[in-house]
Structure formats: C-alpha cells, structure tokens
Amino acid sequence: MRVIVVGGGVVGTMHAWQAVERGHEVVQIEREAEARGASLRNFGQIWVSGRAGGEELDTALRARELWEGIGERVPGLGFRAIGSLTPVRGAREYAVAEAAVARPDAAARGYALVTAAEAREINPALRGAFEAALWCERDAAVEPRTAQLHLREALRASGRYTFLPGREVREVVGEGAVRDDHGDVHRGDAVVLATGAWLSGLVRELVPDLPVRRVRLQMMQTVPLGEPLTTSVADADSFRYYPAYKSAALDELNAGQAQTPIAAAHKMQLLMVQRRDGGLTIGDTHEYEHPFAFDTLEDPYEHLTEVVESLLGRPLPKVRHRWAGVYAQCTDTTRVVHRQQVGDGVWLVTGPGGRGMTCSPAIAETTANELGW
C-alpha cells in the first residue's frame, strides 16, 4: 500500500509512522520547509491527568504507551516519564484534588494526593508556599521543537518514506490522488489530510461546514533554570479548564474563589515543563473569538511569572522566547478528533485541540485500524 500524508505536524507524522510500521510506503507533504504550527508551539506534554473519562482517557493512556515505545526507539524525542504535580492552597483547591483522587479511574491516571513535603521530595525545585499537591504519575514529556525531525530520521531509515517540504496540496484529483502547487500529482491507496489549524483552502472546499474551530494561545520559554524541575507543574486554575476535575468541589471552587482578573480574562492556567536544555516552557492563554489578535499581550506573561515564582520560591529565569500559536479543536469538545472521509480514498483528520501532542500516536493508530492498513 502507498499512503499520502498531507501535513508535517505531529498528527501527520504519527500517521506516517503507523503506515511505515505496518509495512507501507509513505509520502508526506508539508507546505512549509518544516512544520511551524501547534506541533512545535506546545509544552511537549503527554498529558493524561486532565483528560475526560471514557474515550478521551482511553486515547490518552494508549498514546502514552505508544509514546514510551517510540521514545525507546527514537531517543532524540527526549521522552521522559516525569509525571506532574499540581500544588494546591486552601480548602477549596484541596477539595478538588481530593475529589480527583476519589474518581473511579484515579488509579489508571496514577493520581495521588501528596503533602507539600512529599511533593518537594518528588520535585525539590518547588520551594514556594503550598499545602499539598495532586500527583499524576502517568504524565510525561517530549521535546516538541525537534520531535518531528527525529521521527522523520527514523522513518527515512525504513527506506519506505519520502518527505516533500515546500509544497501545498491544492486539489483532490481522483481516488487517492492530490495535486500540489508545483503541479505534481501524488497518487496512493489512501490520502490522509492532517492539516492542523490550516482550515481554509482545500479543507474548506472539501468540508464547508467543518465542526472545528481555531484556538489561539500565548506561551514563553526561559533560559536554563539552573536545577532540575523533575516533573511537569500545573496550578489550580488547571482544575477549571480540564474536564477530569469536574465535581461538586470544583463547582464550589468556581463559586467561592474567583480567578485573578487577568487569568479570567484570558482563560488562563499554568502549565510548565522543563526542556532538555534546562529552560522552562510556560503557558498559557486561550482565545476563541475571530479574528485573533496579531500581537502578544504582556499582562498574561506577568501573571504567569507571578504564579511560577510563587511555586518555585525564587525569581523566574530570564525569558528568551515569547510566542503565540493556533491549534484546531472540535467544536464538540468531548470529541477527541474529527475524522471524516472527504473523497474517494481521502480522509481528513483534524481538531484534537490541546490534545494533539498527547494523543497523536493513538489517533493515528485508530485511523490505520479503521482504514484497514
């Protein structure tokens, strides 16, 4: 079988990986010289802890298993089974963490409620003031800026993989066939359009009423911390954002303890991961209304800095990068991804939202199984 994958981000690359693993030939086409979208502009978190139960959690857990196996074969991914800590302060935040640990699926997530002293044994860099923390053993991390590069190196070694950058696919021209903006036609037994947040052009022509929206976020990265941050770190605002934490305790938190005005205005939470070079990737905001702003705002960064410093108990290292990114999310946010046949032998796979980095290996595996690769 010959598979054409359109899109060089993590979802497209994982579809290429699944096809090559199953013995097929793959041509992967990317409109940029390298992928430049949400697949690079993220935390690199394999984030199990906040996922909704059912299909979403099952997908995240399967993806976590696949990431670990791929990481063993592709060391350049920088896969690290580091877990995560969410420090809590006050009775309301503590109650939400308690409710999470009481979930029927808490063991599958690796949840535990730990004291502040126990949290500091797990992550000594957390010297700030907090009373307890929600620990999630199943969370992990990879290096988002270089993951696709290393995956492609491994794919090339198979002898059945070709990467074609700098080509935008413009048209479906027949069963399992697309034409790019160079005029070249690429034919296969299957075409997967994994175009991320690029929802105009060909995607709009194929699915005018696509139930997917674009979401913009702001993030930043520091110079090296100077010590290990041994886990991912979230703050209690993440309880308000992720579906796993829905409970009566969360309702009470929302009713009785407001977010800061800046966090509320920008729909913020803290997520923080240390990169292999020692720097910290920190975010984020959420913007849903189009047209998106073209500039980044400083107030959210100041808020994140205050939160991080309160948890680390020390000044934040110098910020060396700030950026905005856009990802595609199903308008029905309970759906893991939008997967649709849009032509003879042509499928569109998009809209995983902030789950893209986490869930991409399992999303691609499901596509491969459903298409009978």
Image: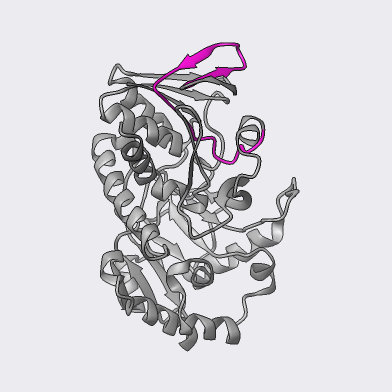
Where residue 84 sits, quadrant-wise, is bottom left
Q: Residue at x 66, y 61 (%)?
A: 300
Picture residue at 30% right of the left edge, 71% below the top: 106
> Foreground: 205 or 61?
205
Q: Residue 13 in the image: x percent, y percent?
A: 41, 33
The magenta span reads: 176-200
Q: Where residue 288 sits: x, y (%)?
A: 67, 56
Q: Along the horizontal axis of the image, is 87 left or right of 30?
A: left
| 159 relative to 247, above or below | above
In the depicted structure, whether residue 87 falls above or below residue 74: below
Residue 163 in percent (x, y) is at: 44, 20
Query: Which residue is depicted at the point 35% across and 66% down?
Result: 124
181 inside magenta stretch = yes
Q: Position of residue 362 (x, y in %)?
A: 34, 46
Q: Residue at x 31, y 65 (%)?
A: 109
Between 271 and 63, the one nearer to me in the picture: 63
Q: Is residue 49 above or below residue 67?
A: below
Instruction: Out of 1 and 295, give the one closest to the viewer.
Output: 1
Please count the marks in the image. 0
Q: Quadrant of the N terminus?
A: top left
113 sits to left or right of 346? left
| Residue that lies at the very extreme toward the top in this rendered image | 183
Question: Looking at the picture, does residue 253 appear above or below residue 219?
Answer: below
